[in-house]
Amino acid sequence: MTETTALPAVSREWHLIRRPQGWPVAEDFALREVPVAAPAEPGRILVRNLHMSVDPYMRGRMNDVKSYIPPFQLDRPMDGGAVGEVVASTAEGFAVGDHVLHGLGWREYAEFDAQHATKVDGAIAPLSAYLGVLGMPGLTAYAGLFETASFKEGDAVFVSGAAGAVGSLVGQFARIKGASRVIGSAGSAEKVDLLTGKYGFDAAFNYKDGPVAKQLREAAPEGIDVYFDNVGGDHLEAAIGALNVHGRATLCGAIAHYNDTEPAPGPRNLMMAIGKRLRLEGLMVSDHYGNKDFVKDVAGWLGSGELTYDETVVEGIENGVDAFLGLLRGENTGKMIVSFTG
Ligand code: NDP
């Protein structure tokens, strides 16, 4: 039986219409209208999206290259994390009014097999938090620090992209778990103040103010034990220089290079990894879905007030591409969210 509410005739969705060369531009995308229909087959739901995620990894999906996740197809809707409200259902266990987390963002309405939806509770946390601190970026920070980097109490930790969704949590998780020193880098004076103020980092610097290696040496005179890399490039090279013997680096992202048209050269000082017995390890958050401790720990730290987070919210699906481009330019503090609630 279909349970449903009144539906609009059309939904808007963002299509990739041309593969960006270097920095994406507005002409690479189109906002198109498609009909909305309640599910016709059993086991399906129609969801009105309330918040969608824009994430740096989406830039890679705009290229036609083989990767860990398939590229976006041209003239098809893009996809990504979203939270919405069920407005029609033929699926057992999903009622109109339920809130779900799913993977069909970049559109106002999504109709799909309910097996691909996870129910979320807006009474436990704001719904957008399931796209950030309690969602994929939160798990990335948690698994990347505690598993990939084998963080232990007393480690000195440096994180780049430190005022972003992942980085702001990495630094706070390290502080909460007893890091001897937490250092962050970010791209503005306001972000640096946020790191050493609200987030409780011990030191922070603006990577645009001067060479990263020099600023890191000043911020971490005794070196670092863990580097959480969101940026790549000169940040990774500086961190290799600053890592102590048996240091570990989580290679999480390389946003400095996502719009490069040629592959960037690797760190010139990689040879230091030999003498210092460094471990540089890649992280895929998808390897950690189902982590048993993540939600329990993070919800506990939020509840106790030890952990805080920020969101930058852009209103309206029509501003979705601008929000994505703004994310690449550093216009976000914490998680960049596009909301359709206005
Ligand atoms: P953020 O919220 O950190 O947003 C991206 C930030 O990158 C911007 O706010 C900007 O901040 C910074 N940035 C942009 N260009 C540069 C540059 N050239 N040099 C230094 N910083 C730059 O995004 P997320 O927290 O969602 O993601 C952080 C990283 O983690 C990304 O690299 C992403 O791809 C990666 N990631 C990897 C996952 C995995 O499984 N491996 C999963 C999730 C994320 P600023 O103002 O400081 O420049």
Image: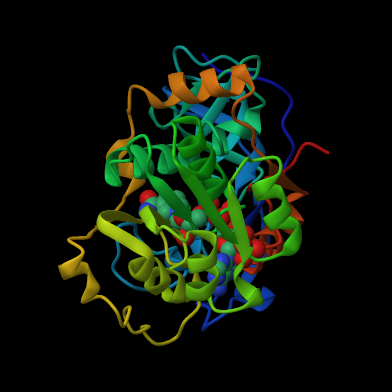
Q: Is residue 183 left or right of residue 186?
A: left
- 85 w.r.t. 191: above or below: above
Question: Residue 152: percent from the left, percent from the top?
Answer: 32, 37
Q: Position of residue 277 (x, y in %)?
A: 17, 61
Above or below residue 14? Residue 291 is: above
| Residue at the image point whose x is 66% and y is 43% from the top | 108
Q: Can residue 73 be seen here? A: no
The residue under the point 36% across, 83% down is 263
Q: Nearer the viewer, residue 194 or 80?
A: 194
Q: What residue is drawn where x is 64% and y is 22%?
A: 305
Q: Residue at x 64, y 75 (%)?
A: 208
Taking 298 as reference, is 66 above or below it? below
Q: Nearer the viewer, residue 51 or 238?
A: 238
Residue 19 position in % (x across, y down):
50, 77
Residue 87 visible here: yes
- Give the left or right position of residue 194, taking residue 139 as reference: right
Residue at the far front in the pictured view: 222
How are the colours assigned in the image? rainbow
